[in-house]
Image: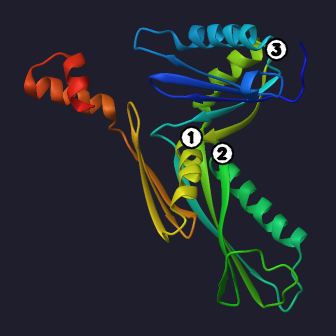
Amino acid sequence: MSDDKIFSIIDFGKSKIRLGIFANYLPNSKYICEFKLDELTDKNTRLEEIIIETENKIDNHLKDINIMIDNSNILSVDYSIKNKIDGVLLDENFIKSQILETKNIIENNYKSYLVSHLLVKDYVLDNVIRDNAPVNLMGNCLIINLKFILIPKKITFEIREIFKRNHIMINNVYNSSYVKSLYYCNFYQNFETKVFIDIGFKKTSVLIYYKNKLQYINYIKIGSDHITRDISKVLNISLQDSENLKI
């Protein structure tokens, strides 16, 4: 069966791979599954098995896919670009060109990283902070404050090769902690400041929002697996008993 109107996304965790396929012809318009991994699993082989199994389940060949990745080596970079505009009327093309120029600067200075997300924190026109682009306004000085979330290219290289062997193109690479926190922001609209802590298998991420805009993201290399092992060691119990106690 062939259907171009398919949206596919896969979330790579340390202990699990989650996959979602969204298409009108599927039951309930979606196919969602979860695959567990362990330390003995060859992740490359498992991923190829998941691709084959999924294509059989949805009776279709996956042509492209979006991927979500989290890793403690992900970087967050803040950058401000300042322009003296001397009374020029600002338009959308000028602002877009400044943002693109900044993205090129980041890519040239972080060659081993992939720009996963480019976020505009705010615009400052003649010392007045604005949430939206100051299109059709005049001023003397424009500052655009940006935040970049960067993913090491080596993390995505092997994944790209596996999908390439299966004739699947990767559309976008997202940071899963950021994407998840965006979703949860919708449930706390009455709060000006929001803090999210995402405890993963081998890492924990912290994200801080102010007025629904990401201000801070960082990682520590401690996750739920470390907690389980510490409980096991201190209480001298099995890892399974420790996991049950932790939950």
Q: State which quarter of the image contains the N terminus.
A: top right
Sooner in the amino-acid sequence: mark 2 or mark 3: 3
Instruction: Name the mark nearer the viewer: 2 or 3.
Output: 3
Q: As shown in the figure, which amino acid type bears the numbered disc 1?
A: Ser
Identify the disc placed on residue 61. 3
Q: Position of residue 74 (x, y in %)?
A: 52, 43
User: How far separated are the C-alphas under marks 2 and 1?
Assistant: 10 Å
Mark 3: secondary structure: loop
Mark 1: secondary structure: helix
Q: Which residue is mark 1?
A: 176
- Give the image quarter of residue 168: top right
In-image side of 180 versus 81 (left or right) = left
Q: As shown in the figure, which amino acid type bears the numbered disc 3?
A: His
In-image side of 243 versus 135 (left or right) = left
Q: State which quarter of the image contains the C terminus.
A: top left
- Give the image quarter of residue 68: top right
Identify the disc placed on residue 116. 2
Q: Characterize the local packing of mark 2: few (<14), some (14-19) or many (20 or more) Cα atoms within 10 angstroms.
A: some
Q: As shown in the figure, which amino acid type bears the numbered disc 2?
A: Ser
Sooner in the amino-acid sequence: mark 3 or mark 1: 3
In-image side of 241 versus 107 (left or right) = left
Residue at image location 84% in from the left, 65% down from the top? 97
User: How far separated are the C-alphas under marks 3 and 1?
Assistant: 25 Å
Mark 2: secondary structure: strand
Identify the disc placed on residue 21. none
Q: Mark 1 and mark 2 in contact (Cβ < 8 Å)?
A: no
- Give the image quarter of residue 158: top right
Q: Characterize the local packing of mark 1: few (<14), some (14-19) or many (20 or more) Cα atoms within 10 angstroms.
A: some
Q: Position of residue 118 (x, y in %)?
A: 68, 55
Q: Position of residue 173 (x, y in %)?
A: 67, 37
Report the colour scheme.
rainbow
Residue at image location 59% in from the left, 30% down from the top? 11
